[in-house]
């Protein structure tokens, strides 16, 4: 579905097309190459995936796309027009789809947004939910410049140092961390203003079992505790997130996990 949208875009044929996967793939789309990234100790690593994509790129300009994001036909043209060193391109108009639709319906939805991000066709009301991606780092749950489609130069990525390899497995905040690192490094974030659809899909753990909402929240909390400690942020931020994780004693849980994270860091040093 994502590739079908890309194929409609001018400049698509001029792009190097690479799938970065953390396992085996059954079918390789025509014109694409595959980079397989093994999981170390069975855990997904965000940094390994980003590094593999950037390192395998033959061109200086890089377009990073999540495999579940659908974009309008003028996306690549807007990237070409706006890309520059020390700049990340993204769109704040991110919409989570509330149900699965056929690819032609998704393409039609992308055409039915006004310039101010309003879905103008009543036929599709209730099919999407607005979840903005924030231009400036937010220390907490939420979508940001790095969570979805973004474009940048290899020079910029290498100057920043890439994604923190600590973040592994399910759970968020690797993108939040990279976003904050990029701001500290003085990067600009340019909002292209186009709609981006986030196609729905379950998240799965071991043996392909679907993970529940509360399990995902706790995995994200563990990452956020590390994030707060790394950037010397008040741990009360993590405690506020912990209150949404159905824990009996959120503050105690956060302190316990913080000690665990720091102990593991000493062992790895």
Image (cartoon, rainbow, N blue to C red):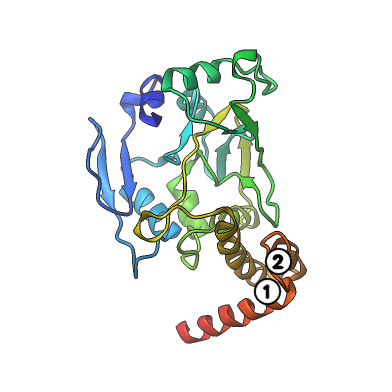
Kindly indicate the quadrant of the structure image that contains residue 124: top right
Circle 1 sits on which residue? 254
77 above or below 145? above
Q: Residue at x 73, y 74 (%)?
A: 249
Q: Earlier in the sequence, mark 2 or mark 1?
A: 2
Q: Nearer the viewer, residue 245 or 237?
A: 245
21 above or below 119? below
Q: Which mark is residue 238?
A: 2
Asked if labels 1 and 2 touch by Cβ distance under 8 angstroms, the answer is yes
Q: Nearer the viewer, residue 267 or 135?
A: 267
Q: Residue at x 45, y 52 (%)?
A: 210
268 above or below 52? below
Residue 191 relative to residue 21: left or right: right
Kindly indicate the quadrant of the structure image that contains residue 42: bottom left
Q: Residue at x 30, y 56 (%)?
A: 37
Q: Is residue 121 visible?
A: no
Q: Secondary structure at mark 2?
A: helix
Q: Residue 261's x, y, as percent?
A: 57, 78
Q: Residue 131's x, y, as percent?
A: 65, 38
Q: Is residue 153 visible?
A: yes
Q: Nearer the viewer, residue 177 or 206?
A: 206
For label 2, the crowd category at 10 Å Cα-Cα, with few meaning under 14, some 14 to 19 and many 20 or more, is many
């Amino acid at each position: 579905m994502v590739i079908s949208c890309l194929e409609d875009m001018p400049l698509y044929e001029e792009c190097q097309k690479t799938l970065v996967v953390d396992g085996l793939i059954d079918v390789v789309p025509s014109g694409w190459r595959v980079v397989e990234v093994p999981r170390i100790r069975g855990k997904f690593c965000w940094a390994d995936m980003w590094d593999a994509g950037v390192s395998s790129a033959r061109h200086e300009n890089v377009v990073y796309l999540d495999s579940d994001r659908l974009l309008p036909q003028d996306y690549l043209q807007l990237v070409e027009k706006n890309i520059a060193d020390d700049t990340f391109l993204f769109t704040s108009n991110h919409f989570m789809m509330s149900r699965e639709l056929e690819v032609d319906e998704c393409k039609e939805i992308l055409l039915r947004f006004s310039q101010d991000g309003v879905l103008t066709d009543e036929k599709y009301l209730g099919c999407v939910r607005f979840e903005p991606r924030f231009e400036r780092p937010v220390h907490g749950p939420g979508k940001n410049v790095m969570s979805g489609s973004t474009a940048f130069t290899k020079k910029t990525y290498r100057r920043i140092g890439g994604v923190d390899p600590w973040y592994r497995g399910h759970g968020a905040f690797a993108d939040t961390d990279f976003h904050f690192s990029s701001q500290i490094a003085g990067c600009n974030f340019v909002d292209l203003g186009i709609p981006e659809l986030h196609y729905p899909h379950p998240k799965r753990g071991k043996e392909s079992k679907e993970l529940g909402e509360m399990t995902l929240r706790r995995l994200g909390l563990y990452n956020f505790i590390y994030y707060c400690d790394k950037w010397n942020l008040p741990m009360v931020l993590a405690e506020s997130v912990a209150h949404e994780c159905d824990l009996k004693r959120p503050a105690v849980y956060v302190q316990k996990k913080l000690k665990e994270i720091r102990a593991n860091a000493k062992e790895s040093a």
